[in-house]
């Protein structure tokens, strides 16, 4: 009887300890901030600044065009489950405006571009009252987004404020190094050959930062229309400037750029596809191109290889 009683006590203690362990695990899991972002570029900032204190999910994966993206029912749940939502702003997520506005009623819903001084933004050539949303192609501007994420996470979780600050500084140092390495590579391209022709006008910040003339067939948003005249104007530019390479984008159909290439050939000017660039989306998760720094390096290497 004594053995049976003590055996029962031992089993009871094991069950109590296991229950406590599960309770601690659940508590630790609940301490992690649930973050939902619209684009992967922003998720990359959150991962680097938040590290072990955040769990992240990006709505838009590789090959997704944020200009045309509409939230699904699954996306609504991810947004509702989040403690905080980060989005780009500047009308990048044009078709998600109402959803994001609704979410902001009961949880922090933050545009990572909100702290960038307006004078540093590039105005839309077709609508001067709006700005180019593709700010991640200017590394200096993207550091403002890093600071915004750090401040918002610190406000939500002040206990780990110092860790967020240190992580943000380390990440911005990596971005500074990325800029220096990129500029060094770009110096391999003759100044007169620094003309970047793409499917849509996503690289204006890149051009300003690294000294490129940038031409896109479509406007800032892929929602904008392009016609035969736009194609012809771009062909004229390629022929007159003797530009040898144009670039496709991972999140946009090749159809428009192929029309430019074929039209140039009909004019006796041989133009090659210089490679695929990441513009509005990054690469597959788990790959180097699935990180902001890896994506940027891929673009630099592709451009330099085609134009130098």
Image (spheres, rainbow, N blue to C red):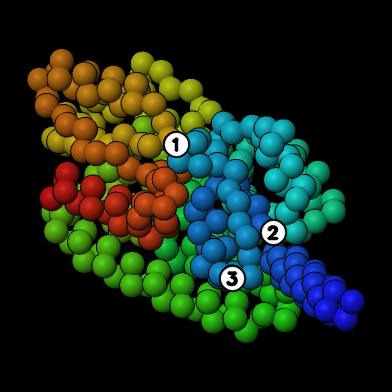
* Nearest to the observer: residue 286 or residue 92: 286
- Residue 18 picture location, percent across and down: 75, 70
- Give the alpha-carbon distance from disc 1 to disc 3, as whole Å: 28 Å
| Circle 3 residue | 52
- Residue 265 picture location, percent across and down: 15, 20
Determine whether 180 is above or below 260 in the image.
below
Quick one: label 2, few (<14), some, or many (20+) residues within 10 Å? some
| Circle 1 residue | 63
Q: Which residue is drawn at 60% across and 51% down?
A: 57
Choose the circle earlier in sequence order: 2 or 3: 2
* Nearest to the observer: residue 118 or residue 15: 15
Choose the circle earlier in sequence order: 1 or 2: 2
Q: Residue at x 85, y 74 (%)?
A: 4
- In this image, 185 relative to 144: left or right? left
- Residue 166 picture location, percent across and down: 54, 82
- On the image, which quarter does residue 138 sit in? bottom left
| Circle 2 residue | 34
């Amino acid at each position: 009887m004594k053995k049976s009683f003590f055996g029962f006590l031992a089993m009871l203690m094991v069950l109590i300890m296991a229950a406590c362990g599960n309770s601690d695990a659940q508590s630790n899991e609940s301490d992690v901030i649930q973050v939902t972002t619209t684009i992967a570029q922003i998720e990359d900032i959150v991962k680097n600044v938040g590290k072990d204190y955040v769990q992240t999910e990006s709505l838009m994966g590789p090959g997704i065009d944020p200009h045309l993206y509409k939230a699904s029912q699954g996306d609504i749940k991810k947004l509702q489950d989040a403690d905080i939502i980060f989005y780009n702003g500047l009308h990048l997520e044009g078709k998600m405006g109402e959803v994001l506005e609704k979410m902001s009623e009961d949880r922090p819903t933050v545009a990572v571009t909100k702290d960038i001084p307006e004078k540093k933004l590039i105005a839309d050539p077709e609508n001067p009252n709006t700005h180019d949303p593709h700010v991640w192609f200017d590394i200096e501007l993207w550091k403002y987004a890093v600071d915004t994420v750090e401040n918002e996470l610190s406000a939500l979780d002040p206990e780990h404020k110092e860790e967020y600050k240190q992580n943000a500084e380390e990440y911005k140092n990596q971005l500074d190094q990325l800029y220096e390495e990129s500029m060094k590579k770009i110096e391999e391209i003759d100044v007169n050959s620094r003309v970047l022709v793409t499917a849509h006008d996503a690289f204006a910040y890149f051009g300003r930062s690294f000294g490129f003339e940038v031409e896109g067939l479509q406007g800032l948003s892929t929602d904008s229309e392009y016609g035969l005249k736009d194609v012809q104007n771009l062909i004229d530019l390629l022929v007159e400037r003797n530009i040898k390479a144009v670039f496709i984008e991972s999140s946009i159909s090749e159809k428009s750029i192929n029309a430019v290439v074929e039209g140039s050939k009909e004019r006796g000017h041989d133009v090659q596809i210089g490679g695929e660039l990441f513009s509005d989306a990054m690469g597959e998760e788990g790959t180097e191109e699935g990180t902001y720094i890896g994506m940027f390096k891929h673009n630099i290497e592709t451009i330099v290889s085609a134009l130098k």
